[in-house]
Image (cartoon, rainbow, N blue to C red):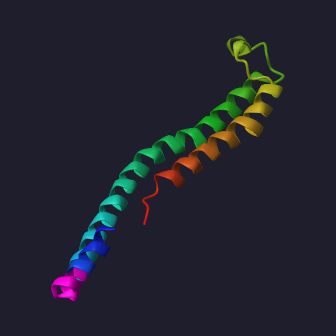
Amino acid sequence: MKSLQEIIRALKTGGNLSESMNDIAEDVSFNLRLAVSEFGQRMNFFGVIFIFGAIVMPVMVAILGSIRNSPIKASMPSFEMLPLGIPIMAAFFVVIMPFVLVVFLFYIKNAQPRV
């Protein structure tokens, strides 16, 4: 909107239209560079959260669940208190993990800079 007003003003006053267009292009490119830079900074922090949520957490649950559900129960009594039975692990990998990944995707989609 602002750029359109600048073009109309340059045409009405007889100013240099190419100079006005160059100034508008520089402003727009600066704003886009700034938005992309901010997006990159947010994605750096998001990468750490994604690594934990999508890689470390499922592996940790799988390892703890396999220890909890192993047939050798006498040597590991402390793992008996973990609530990682087969139904809970199935719900984690079939319901919770896809939900977490969809939330990550929506966040990335909404955080992208608008052109």
Quarter of the view holding residue 25: bottom left
Residue 15: say if magenta. yes
The structure residue drawn at horizontal position 47% and vertical position 48%, both measured from the top left corner, is 47
Residues shaded magenta: 10-21
The structure residue drawn at horizontal position 71% and vertical position 34%, both measured from the top left corner, is 62
Drawn side of residue 47 relative to residue 82, left or right: left
Q: As drawn, which residue projects farthest toward the front?
A: 12
- Residue 110 spot, x, y in % from top left: 51, 52
The structure residue drawn at horizontal position 44% and vertical position 61%, both measured from the top left corner, is 114
Quarter of the view holding residue 100: top right
Q: Does residue 40 sit above or below 11 in this rendering?
A: above
Q: Does residue 24 sit above or below 61 in this rendering?
A: below
- Report the predominant secondary structure element of the magenta stretch: helix
Instruction: Give the quarter of the figure containing the N terminus.
Output: bottom left
Quarter of the view holding residue 84: top right
- Residue 78 spot, x, y in % from top left: 68, 12
